[in-house]
Image (spheres, rainbow, N blue to C red):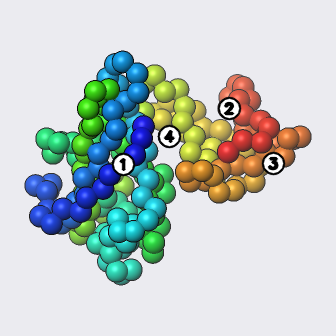
Amino acid sequence: TGNIDQTIEVEPLPTFGYNYSTSIELDPASGSEDLTDFPVLVQVSSAPIADNLRTVSNGGHVENANGYDIVFFDENYSQLDHQIESYDPSTGVYNAWVRIPLLSHTSTTTIYMAYGNPGISSDPSTTDVWISSYKGVWHLNNDATDATATGNDGTESNTADIAGVIGGGMDFNGFNSYVQFNPLTVMSGNDE
């Protein structure tokens, strides 16, 4: 939705054992209405935030090798639903979709990314990022698994895994490659 400003907080937020946090300011939504339950891509790819998101063994502050102790909170410190798309523990490069309950169209929305909790060992990702109006979301990270609760997984045929704009992607040869979703084939051609 626009630029993301990031600030490293000196004091930890009151967020259940997370030792570090950074604020993320989201530009107002375009249009004339607020957006509800809007999934926002949080993409961290450069210093200083990416350096902090490396695992402790790589000189950062993240405790879990899968980035499971990276979570998001709203301004009232209520945890937000998110879904990890990719994480590199050695570089801190991180991509996640975060469901924003209300994204204002008139003012910035501030959320917080908290990290550095040694007590977290399970994946906090949830399909709740995608509300029921999403019938399918495919990240294409080496497969055609549906990221929503609807479970519309696809079966690949003659595709190649490639790097995508956000995470993974698929290369279609334009001839006989496709992804089969029962009962229809929905993707073909050269997409990522």
Give the distance between the C-alpha atoms of the residues marked 4 and 1, in whole angstroms.
24 Å
Give the distance between the C-alpha atoms of the residues marked 2 and 3, in whole angstroms.
15 Å
Give whichever of discs 4 and 1 has the lower sequence position.
1
Which picture quadrant has residue 179?
top right
Instruction: Give the residue number, with chain letter if any, for mark 3.
Output: 158
Instruction: Give the residue number, with chain letter if any, for mark 4.
Output: 147
Give whichever of discs 4 and 3 has the lower sequence position.
4
Instruction: Give the residue number, with chain letter if any, for mark 2.
Output: 181
Instruction: State which quarter of the image contains the N terminus.
Output: top left
Mark 4 surroundings within 10 Å by alpha-carbon count, few (fewer than 14), some (14 through 19), many (20 or more): many
- Would you place residue 134 above or below residue 190 in this image? above
Q: Amino acid at mark 2?
A: Phe
Say whether residue 21 is visible. Answer: yes
Instruction: Give the residue number, with chain letter if any, for mark 1.
Output: 4
Residue 5 location in percent, x, y? 32, 52
Give the distance between the C-alpha atoms of the residues marked 4 and 3, in whole angstroms.
22 Å
